[in-house]
Image: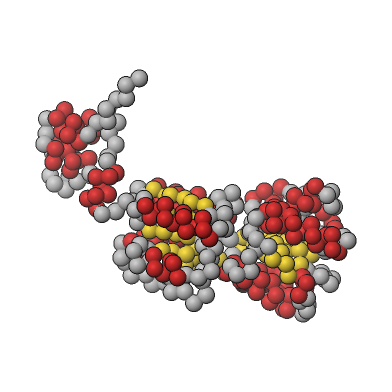
Amino acid sequence: MKKQKRITITDIAKIAGVSKTTASLVLNGRGKEMRVSDDTIARITAIAEQYQYQPNIHARSLRDNRSYALGLVIPDITNYGFASVAYELEILCREAGIQLLISCTDENAAQETLAIEHLLSRQIDGLIVASCLQSDFEYQRLSKQIPVVLFDRYFEGTTLPFVVTDSITATQQLIAKIASTKGIDEFYFLGGQSTLSPTKDRLLGFTQGLSQAQINLKSEWIIHGHYHPSSGYEMFGSLCASLGRPPKFVFTSACGLLDGVLRYLSQNKIMQNEVYLAGFDDHYLYDSLSIPIDTVAQNNPELASHCFRLVMGLINQTNLETHQIFIPAKIHQRHE
């Protein structure tokens, strides 16, 4: 089937019996401003709707020297937290007439570099990134070309803008509350990569919570892997094997790790009263599980909103009152 030719402003102007300039002003929303008559505006608009006219984004980009596209780089789109923030960001971008381009790195530094290169080739206006790199050197360099906002993770001492959850405070409060009301002689921390800021902050909150409950932390309680469900499964399985039983209290530092723990519990038919589960990140499905899980819930809409506000502020070259933001988290306790 022969493809129908896409209608242009020139075509609409010809059909409406007006100049191309007049048609362009009306279709760009400037008809009233430039004193085009109401009848002419109505005629041009009706023709555009009849022929399903779509503005040429490339022409708009050339005119404004912008692509009207943002890049979002995250480790894993299947992770509920990242997926939720991506969803909220996409809504904000859509409402602003901006395309959100999403790339995943799988926590791989080489893949992250490649993802950034691909996004830059699309001439994105700004970048929001949850990085797995060990320093901000590359992003400091990149920020001289386009606005860069760090999300979920930050580098110690960085001057780059970032938006992250205040992991320390809420984790400390949750762990202290659990530890002070239970007879605890062990409490295990299953974390991701030890070099990443979320792991560091959540571990600090964990240790401060135990200290607040006057429980002496043992080094063997701290176990690190990576932020994949498979790592949660392996760490928990290895812990069960070394103890000869399930651990009594466990805190996972991300929902992906908790997913792996739950899969191990299910596959090995471990009863829910044998282990007390708590974790960082919440999921609405946790309310439907037979096993109670206490969680630290991030405010994903707020994370997305602040990321969008910062990157758009940088694009529009407006002064930012605050460019490094910690969003409070909430505790969701399900144990009775």
Residue 240 in the image, given as x and y percentages of width and height: 83, 60
Q: Is residue 17 above or below residue 234?
A: above
Of 35 and 153, the residue lying toward us? 153
Of 212 and 314, the residue lying toward us? 314
Q: Quadrant of residue 169?
A: bottom right
Asked whether residue 178 is in view, the answer is: no
Residue 336 in the image, given as x and y percentages of width and height: 78, 60
Q: Quadrant of residue 36?
A: top left
Residue 23 in the image, given as x and y percentages of width and height: 17, 38
Residue furthest to the top: 1
Q: How is the image coloured?
A: secondary structure
Determine whether, in the image, residue 302 is placed left or right of residue 288: left
Asked whether residue 98 is in view, the answer is: yes
Q: Quadrant of residue 182?
A: bottom right
Residue furthest to the front: 110
Q: Residue at 13% of width from left, 46% of height from top?
A: 34
Of 301 and 241, the residue lying toward us? 241
Q: Residue at 64% of width from left, 50% of height from top?
A: 284
Number of marks drawn: 0
Q: Residue at 31% of width from left, 66% of height from top?
A: 318
Q: Is residue 223 above or below residue 56?
A: below
Q: Residue at 29% of width from left, 31% of height from top?
A: 52
Determine whether, in the image, residue 250 is placed left or right of residue 227: right
Give the quadrant of the N terminus: top left
